[in-house]
Amino acid sequence: MASFRAGRARPLMTPAPVIAIAGDAEALAGQVARFVAARMSNAPDRFSLSLSGGTTPKRIYELLGAGDLGVPLDWRKVHLFWGDERFVPMDHQDSNYRMAREAFIDQVPVPFSQVHPILTGARTPEIAAALYEETLQSFYGSKILDPERPLFDVTLLGLGEDGHTASLFPGTKALDERNAWVTAIIGAKPEPRISLTYPALESSGMILFIVSGAKKRDILARVLANDLTLPAARLATRGTIHIFADRAALPD
């Protein structure tokens, strides 16, 4: 995978992603849930997890909530964040926060103060983005990201059929944002979105792409070929990138 930096003649390449293959969507969800649980269990103190929306992550969250993953999970040390959100009420059926809350947050003893949703009750998407940036910076303890100190331990991301990830869509000005940690995305979809930008997404010990279904096969092939027209292919991190895919999504 690669990332474009203004002023550079060539893209900055990350180490090659680690690819794990599961037989089907259910096996994929179990594989990712066990991977996240192991990292959570091994974390010495606090563990920061950035969540993704979508149907495949929902099953992962249900498995995390059930807790039968082979390792003890101490939810008291976990902080939960979101990579993006639709600008809809937090109880709306399309809310990523609502999905995660119903899938697992309500079933686990994570302290309420350690659940950090994007506050879509703000007056505008821009205000919601600014407030979330303040939340992230307060948690991190600085307004400047240190390449040696990741914001997140693990970041979960999906891959859209157009190559978007989080709410970073092709052709949007958010792709060039390198200062703000969070931004409002207006016009890419019918509803406004709030999304983490590349600097925040890339500040992760591990980035996990979760890719399922035959409809994702072609776009995953393009990402693996470092097609820099695709937002997902531009991610670069000092940590590691893992791609968890089921066989249906695996390129030929």
Image (spheres, rainbow, N blue to C red):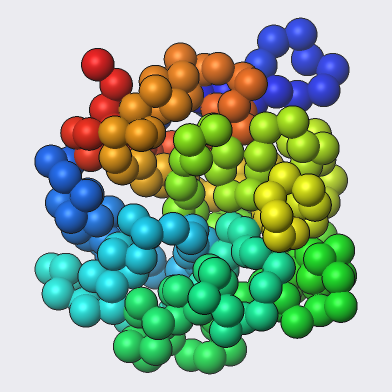
Q: Residue at x 54, y 69 (%)?
A: 94
Residue drawn at point x = 47 percent, y = 40 percent:
159
- The answer to whether residue 153 is visible is no
Identify which residue, 80 or 87, lies in the foreground: 87
| In the image: residue 250, left or right of residue 175 | left
Depicted 220 relative to depicted 169: above or below: above
> In the drawing, does residue 28 fall left or right of residue 239?
left
Question: Residue 243 falls in which quadrant of the image?
Answer: top left
Q: Percent from the top left, x then y, of residue 103?
A: 36, 77
Residue lying farthest to the top in this orientation: 9
How many numbered markers are drawn?
Answer: 0
Residue at 82%, 23% in the rendered image? 6
Residue 182 higher or lower than 213, as above or below = below
Q: Is residue 247 visible?
A: yes
* Between 206 and 24, the one nearer to me in the picture: 24
Q: Position of residue 129 (x, y in %)?
A: 79, 64
Q: Position of residue 61 (x, y in %)?
A: 33, 69
Above or below, comparing residue 244 to residue 122 in the picture:
above
Q: Nearer the viewer, residue 38 or 208?
A: 208
Image x and y of residue 86, in percent: 65, 64
Residue 62 picture quarter: bottom left
Q: Tell me the residue at 37%/46% (across/down).
A: 210
Q: In this rendered view, identify the residue nearer to me: 111 or 84.
A: 84
Which of the image's four quarters has the C terminus? top left
> Does residue 172 lie above or below 227 as drawn?
below
